[in-house]
Image (spheres, rainbow, N blue to C red):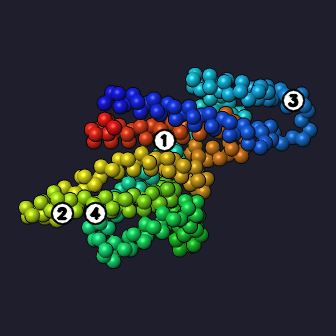
Amino acid sequence: MRTFILRRLLVSAVTLFGLLTINFFIIHLAPGGPLEIFDNPDMSAEVRKLILKSYGLDQPLPIQYWSYLKSMCRLEFGYSIAKKRPVADEILDTLPNTIQLSMLALSLELSLGIIIGIVAAVRQDSHLDKTLRLSSLTLYSIPEFYLGLLFLLLFAGGVGALAWLPPSGMVDLVAYDSMGFFEKLADRILHLILPCMTIALGGAASISRYMRGQLLEVIRQDYIRTARAKGLSERAVIFKHGLRNALMPIITIIGLSLPVVFSGTVIVENVFGWPGMGRVAVDAAFQRDYPIFLAVNLMFGALVVAGNLLADILYAVVDPRVRLS
């Protein structure tokens, strides 16, 4: 087991290094540059040179890359060019918000997907099963940004009778400070509903189809027929014998879902004005704010790699054959 974990840690480190390198060269080779945010046509050449030198952008690209690697090894993310503040402060301000949104969305995605998959498998080929499969396929096919806009239209003021939920932000900026504890909690929950649903529904649709197929495959096995022959109730057969084995591959799905969830937050945070790292990353890309763009993308990559590493380890714990492969 120790060798298995060390091997996975080595693969994770190589993956992060590759991600760091690709992000660095992509943002530097893209058209434009950080000086565009100053938007001052009267800026002299001397001032431009001083600004570039202050951020180390006057050096050749290989030297910039080497300096960047050394800074990352020291966990020094530098200063934001656009926001004039340490990048680490920007990450500390927004990372908890992104983790909160993504983890709640992932929990909702897994719960809905597993429940719908079980119901569809138990009621195989019924009208309910066909309805659930059609609904899952439809939700899986809708892009997240379009689904988010539909939710805004239906539930956040687009239609007067259904203006039930706040359209943007994390809290009510006007009244939040004057609220009591439970009012603040309710306000946060209301602001979470739409972005969480937008991220979770597509993934839940995919997991439900996968769960249905796995459970149908399991309940055709010989030991399931034996359990039924012993006189066990159908509920006991499904939940005690079938579900336990059908859920094992879902551990892998959790690892695969993490990149989708985190990439989904980039889109959803901008649609709903959620103050997270995804929104910061988009702003930094448009402003060519190299330090903050590279740091935020590295943080996203680290979270995804950590999630996949955890899924690999959990799968090895559940199924010892994985350690020997």
In-front residue for pair 253/97: 253
The disc labelled 3 sits on which kind of residue? Val
Q: Which residue is the site of mark 3?
A: 47
Q: Where is residue 310 in the image (x, y as percent from the top left)?
A: 39, 38
Image side of residue 237 versus residue 308, left or right: left
Residue at the image point whose x is 47% and y is 33% from the top: 12
Question: Is the residue under label 3 in contact with that under label 4 (CB below 8 Å)?
Answer: no
What type is the residue that disc 4 sits on? Answer: Leu
Disc 1 to disc 3: CB gap under 8 Å: no
SS of the residue under disc 3 = helix
Q: Do the residues labelled 2 and 1 touch (CB within 8 Å)?
A: no
Tag 4 secondary structure: helix
Q: Nearer the viewer, mark 2 or mark 3?
A: 2
Q: Residue 221 carries which label?
A: none
**Residue 77 picture quarter:** top right
Residue on which the image places disc 1:
304
Residue identified by numbered label 2: 235
